[in-house]
Each structure stands twice: as structure tokens, then as C-alpha cells.
């Protein structure tokens, strides 16, 4: 089959000559864009917010253009600088210090952004949690990080298992409530009396900034630990890949509970000083188009799931809106289907630029650039400063067109610096100088990378990572469930869905009602996105002799594929 190619886009792109930049590039060149280059003093909150607030030409520019069904607000860089100063003072008052873990469990509302930068200004480490998490997910993350302060809303408070969280000293409540013990701090009241001035805590580039919990195939979610240094790469990719320009309006649809929502929903746009659109609430295709239209969005970063939904909504929906401001579209999180790229050309008259990276990598690594040809279905090529390759299990590079582990040469600015509390997990990512991603891929003769799948059992449902172990653990907490095995099952719109196989304890009867009850148990105990969309009873769960669930075998059964090597299967 003839390989489809979409030629490079003509125009004044920030990165015009990829090959030349790769040859001459040095990460130090990027540092010149930051004041710490001269002072040695650094803080992400300064570079992303205060720097613009101190610039007379930028301070009144809208930083955050917020809209939700029930609320609309424009917040300037100066206002964001002041509100985050106030919040930093509130934290200081309650003894928050550099390095403390301060978590946020709340919807994306403007207060989130004030609190988030307030945390960074004190030198503490921020931990944003997805609003859909239920009790178990909150417990795991707050226990592991030993968080001392949580910022949440009265609505979500019921999901915080305080009795299991001995390190949690204070809870800051955003919104009306009737709590009056010493544990609770009222956001509105404290913010009113807090000073608008704050002496920012200058930190080292290698000091901690952020923890994102993410799922692997074994064990509890792991705390991926990022440092202020990440700004170098986030700035560079905002420039080259997002192609942001002074005066742009930018929209990233991701929630800050996920890494895309922080690296590219907060840091990248504000390091570049552009107006950032944030939309709260749930989306329909109509909302998506409506937001692009109403805010005159120039650059849009979204996910294949969203794009597939738009595709199925049909071209009529596009035509109802004026999308003439839109100049640049990007995608991340799961494979971007070639047909979506082709549809994008028709529907928007624009190329959709796929980008590949992970929570662990902190910023984009393999991308499609506006000045480069796109090969639909390919993730593109590594950005300048990044060496990517395909390696075998010993960490040796394999020839072009051969499948293997997608790997990155160790050491880039935004790379995670640790897995919180788990050094051996961190080390397990590296083989022979390569960071091994867990994705399988191949590289063609021209250096384009093609995603093939996950090598482990991690499930990617609508772009969200779900660890089968976490779901299995929750399932067996239900009194009727004896054993559980969880897999990702291919799905046309969501990429994959979570499918669970369960066996029952003595004395319980198989029924559809029971399946639904167990499903709800996971949904309300862990989180909605991790709840199995499909469930099935089975008489036994296949396990290895050492007791590991053979998810691969469950998957082969589900898909009617050959079962491969089953020599380790238990009797
Ligand atoms: C998958 C999201 C195909 C991949 C930023 C990776 C992708 C995991 C792409 C990381 C892409 C991400 N094409 N697959 N362009 N981008 N993935 O940590 O399996 O939530 O390992 O980070 O998503 O997911 P995470």
C-alpha cells in the first residue's frame, strides 16, 4: 500500500529547520530565555506567572480564560500572581515548608490555579488529583505521598478517608461549608485576610515541584516526581511543537489531574505567556466547537478520543461554527488513527499533529512539527535534544522497521527524577543507558516512529492510564468476589475499555444484578474511569505457578487469539 504523506505546512513556524536544529542544538540555548540564567534563582511560579505580572506590557493580559456551564471569568497575569501570593501566605501561616507535599483534589476552577501556584511559591510540591477519584484512589495517593495539606471542596470532602491519613494536618475547603474543627481552613476567609505580597521561595532547578500518580501493570499507582528543571523542555516544546506565538489563544482540553493538564495545560502556555482557555465541566462535540469558536482559539491540544467523537458527530457540526482562528491542532495520549488525520484535513482544513510522551517523561519527546511532513499513523520524530530508538530487551538498538521497545537516551530536562518512595521502581525503567517506555514501536528508514501497543498490561481507556492491579484489588474487596483478572479490550471510540473477569466466593449466585453491583462498587470506591465497562463471570482466573494473573491469556481468550506459551500456567 502506498504510504500516505501530508506535506509540511508553509508558514512562519517557530522551528523552521528541524534537521539543522537537531545538529546544533544544546539545552543550554533554551536557558537563555529565563532570568535564572543570570541570578541562579529559580521557581516555576515566577517564570510562568510573576515574570509576566511584573512586565507592564503583559500584566493586564488575560492569563486564564475560564468558562464552565455556571461560571465565566477572565483572570490576568497580575491577578493570578496576586491570588497565588495570597494562597502562598495562607500555606505559610499553617507552617508549610519547602518539600512538603500539598495535594489538590478539586474541579478545574480558577481557585485551583491560585492554589497550585501558591504551593509552588512556597517551594512545596504540588499533587493534583483528578476530581473523579473515589475513596480508595485518594487513600492510596495521600498515604504514599504523606501529604500534609489537602485543598478540596465541601462536595468532595466525603471521599477523603481522614481516619486513614495520619500525616494530613489541614484541609483547605473551597466553597461554603459547616465544618468547624481545627483541621479545616476556609479558603475564602483566609484569602481575604492574606497579604497580596509574598517573598517567593527560590529553589534549585533540581528541587521537587510536582508529583503525578500514574498506573503501571503491577502494584499501587506510583508517584512520578518532577522538578523545576522541567520548564526548560516545556518551554522549548511550547515554542517548537505547540508553535505558540505572542498574542495567541491556546486551549488544552486535559484536566490537571493528568500530566497533559499540567505540563501543557498550565506550564507550557504560561511559560510562553499566552492566554490559556480552561473549560470546566463535561464536553459534548457542540461544546468543543463552541469553545473554539467563542474564544477564537488559535492552537488546540486535545486527544484522539475527543477527535473520534467529533468525527462521528459529522461535518455539519463543524460547519455551524466559525473556526477561522484555529491555526494549529495537536493530539496526545493514545494512537491517533490515520483516518482521523485525514478527516481533520477535510473538516478543519488543518493537519492534526500527533505527539508522544508519558507522565514519566514530563514533556513531549516524539512529535509531528508544523514544518515537517506528516505520515498519518506515525507519532513523528524526536524533538531536538532527544535521542529515541527501538531497543531489544537487553537495551541494544534494533534496525529500522523492526519492532521493539520504544526507548529514550537517559537524561532530558523534564524527565522524572524519582518514583516517590520507590527507588527500585525508578531504576527498573532504565536499561543500558536507555529509558524504556513500555510501549512497542518501530522506526522507519526516515526516522518516523510508529506506535504498536503497550508491552505491559497497562490499559489506555480514552487516553487515561488504568492499572489492572488497582482494579483487581478493588474488585476482590467486594464480598462476593473471590478472584479477579482485568484487561483492556479494544474499542472503536475509547481505544480500549476495562474488562473484568471475576470468580465468586461460596454462597453467591451468578446474576446480571450482581455484576452491576460489583461494577458500581468499583465505580464508587475507586473511580469512574477505572470501573469495568464489561464484566464476566468465569470459573477460574488463569495464573502462573507463582500466582501471577496471566492477563495476556485472558486477553487472548477474549479476542479469540492463539494463547501462545502457557507453560507457566498453574494446573
Ligand atoms: C500512550 C500521557 C500512541 C502510550 C501524556 C504511553 C500514546 C502512555 C501517545 C502514556 C501517542 C501517549 N500515540 N500512544 N501519541 N501518547 N500514548 O502517562 O502508551 O497518561 O506510554 O501520558 O500513553 O500515558 P500517560
Image (cartoon, grey):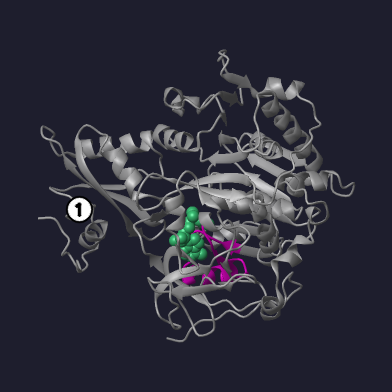
- Residue occupying the point 82% across, 51% down: 39
Looking at the rendered image, the quarter that the N terminus falls into is bottom left
Of residues 398 and 431, the one nearer the viewer is 431
Quadrant of the rendered image containing residue 281: top right
* Vertical position of residue 321 compared to residue 150: above or below: below
Is 427 magenta? The answer is no
- Residue occupying the point 17% across, 64% down: 566
- Residue occupying the point 56% across, 65% down: 355
Point out the stretch of residues depicted in magenta.
Answer: 330-358
Q: Is residue 312 in view from this perspective?
A: no
Of residues 145 and 58, the one nearer the viewer is 145
* Vertical position of residue 212 compared to residue 363: above or below: above
Residue 235 placement, left or right of 223: right
Quadrant of the rendered image containing residue 385: bottom right
Estimate the x, y position of residue 488 in percent, counting from the top left.
Answer: 33, 56
- Determine crowd level at label 1: few under 14, some 14-19, many 20+ residues with C-alpha closer than 10 A: few
Q: Residue lying at the far right in this picture: please name it.
A: 56
Estimate the x, y position of residue 423 in percent, counting from the top left.
Answer: 46, 50
Q: Is residue 116 in view from this perspective?
A: yes
Q: What element carries label 1?
A: loop
Count of marks placed on residues: 1
- Residue occupying the point 60% across, 79% down: 373
Looking at the rendered image, the quarter that the C terminus falls into is bottom left
Is 357 magenta? The answer is yes
Amino acid at each position: 500500500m502506498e504510504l500516505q504523506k501530508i506535506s509540511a505546512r508553509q508558514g512562519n513556524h517557530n522551528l523552521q529547520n528541524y534537521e539543522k536544529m537537531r545538529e546544533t542544538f544544546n539545552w543550554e540555548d533554551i536557558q537563555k530565555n529565563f532570568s535564572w540564567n543570570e541570578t541562579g534563582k529559580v521557581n516555576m511560579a515566577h517564570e510562568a506567572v510573576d515574570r509576566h505580572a511584573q512586565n507592564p506590557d503583559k500584566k493586564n493580559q488575560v492569563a486564564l480564560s475560564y468558562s464552565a456551564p455556571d461560571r465565566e471569568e477572565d483572570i490576568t497575569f497580575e491577578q493570578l500572581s496576586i491570588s497565588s501570593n495570597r494562597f502562598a501566605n495562607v500555606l505559610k501561616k499553617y507552617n508549610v515548608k519547602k518539600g512538603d507535599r500539598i495535594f489538590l483534589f478539586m474541579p478545574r476552577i480558577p481557585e485551583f490555579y491560585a492554589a497550585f501556584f501558591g504551593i509552588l511559591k512556597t517551594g512545596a510540591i504540588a499533587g493534583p488529583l483528578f476530581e473523579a477519584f473515589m475513596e480508595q484512589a485518594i487513600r492510596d495517593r495521600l498515604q504514599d505521598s504523606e501529604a500534609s495539606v489537602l485543598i478540596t471542596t465541601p462536595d468532595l470532602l466525603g471521599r477523603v478517608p481522614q481516619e486513614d491519613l495520619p500525616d494530613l494536618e489541614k484541609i483547605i475547603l473551597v466553597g461554603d461549608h459547616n465544618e468547624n474543627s481545627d483541621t479545616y481552613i476556609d479558603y475564602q476567609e483566609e484569602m481575604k485576610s492574606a497579604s497580596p505580597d509574598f517573598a517567593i521561595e527560590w529553589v534549585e532547578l533540581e528541587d521537587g515541584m510536582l508529583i503525578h500518580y500514574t498506573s503501571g501493570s503491577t502494584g499501587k499507582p506510583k508517584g512520578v516526581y518532577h522538578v523545576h528543571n522541567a520548564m526548560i523542555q516545556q518551554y522549548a516544546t511550547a515554542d517548537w511543537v505547540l508553535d505558540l506565538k505572542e498574542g495567541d489563544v491556546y486551549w488544552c482540553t486535559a484536566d490537571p489531574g493528568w500530566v497533559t493538564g499540567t505540563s501543557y495545560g498550565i506550564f507550557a502556555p504560561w511559560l510562553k505567556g499566552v492566554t490559556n482557555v480552561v473549560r470546566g465541566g463535561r464536553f459534548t462535540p457542540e461544546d468543543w466547537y463552541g469553545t473554539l469558536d467563542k474564544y477564537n482559539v488559535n492552537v488546540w491540544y486535545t486527544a484522539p478520543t475527543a477527535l473520534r467523537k467529533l468525527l462521528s458527530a459529522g461535518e455539519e457540526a463543524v460547519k455551524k461554527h466559525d473556526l477561522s482562528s484555529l491555526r494549529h491542532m495537536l493530539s496526545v495520549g493514545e494512537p491517533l488513527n490515520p483516518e482521523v488525520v485525514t478527516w481533520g484535513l477535510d473538516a478543519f482544513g488543518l493537519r492534526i499533529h500527533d505527539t508522544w510522551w508519558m507522565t514519566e517523561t514530563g514533556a513531549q519527546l516524539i512529535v509531528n512539527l508544523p514544518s515537517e511532513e506528516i505520515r498519518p499513523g506515525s507519532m513523528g520524530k524526536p524533538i531536538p535534544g532527544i535521542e529515541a530508538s527501538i531497543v531489544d530487551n537487553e537495551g541494544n538498538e534494533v534496525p529500522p522497521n523492526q519492532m521493539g521497545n520504544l526507548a529514550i537516551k537517559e537524561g532530558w530536562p523534564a524527565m522524572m527524577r524519582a518514583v516517590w518512595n520507590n527507588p527500585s521502581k525508578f531504576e527498573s525503567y532504565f536499561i543500558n543507558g536507555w529509558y524504556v517506555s513500555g510501549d512497542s514501536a518501530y522506526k522507519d528508514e526516515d526516522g518516523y516512529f510508529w506506535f504498536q501497543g503497550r508491552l505491559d498490561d497497562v490499559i489506555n481507556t480514552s487516553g487515561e492510564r488504568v492499572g489492572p492491579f488497582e482494579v483487581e484489588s478493588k474488585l476482590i474487596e467486594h464480598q462476593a468476589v473471590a478472584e479477579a483478572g482485568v484487561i483492556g479490550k479494544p474499542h472503536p471510540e475509547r481505544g480500549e475499555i476495562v474488562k473484568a473477569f471475576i470468580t465468586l466466593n461460596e454462597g453467591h449466585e451468578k446474576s446480571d444484578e450482581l455484576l452491576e453491583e460489583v461494577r458500581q462498587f468499583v465505580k464508587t470506591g475507586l473511580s469512574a474511569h477505572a470501573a469495568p465497562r464489561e464484566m464476566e463471570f468465569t470459573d477460574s482466573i488463569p495464573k502462573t505457578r507463582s500466582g501471577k494473573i496471566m492477563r495476556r491469556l485472558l486477553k487472548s481468550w477474549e479476542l479469540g487469539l492463539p494463547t501462545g506459551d502457557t507453560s507457566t500456567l498453574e494446573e
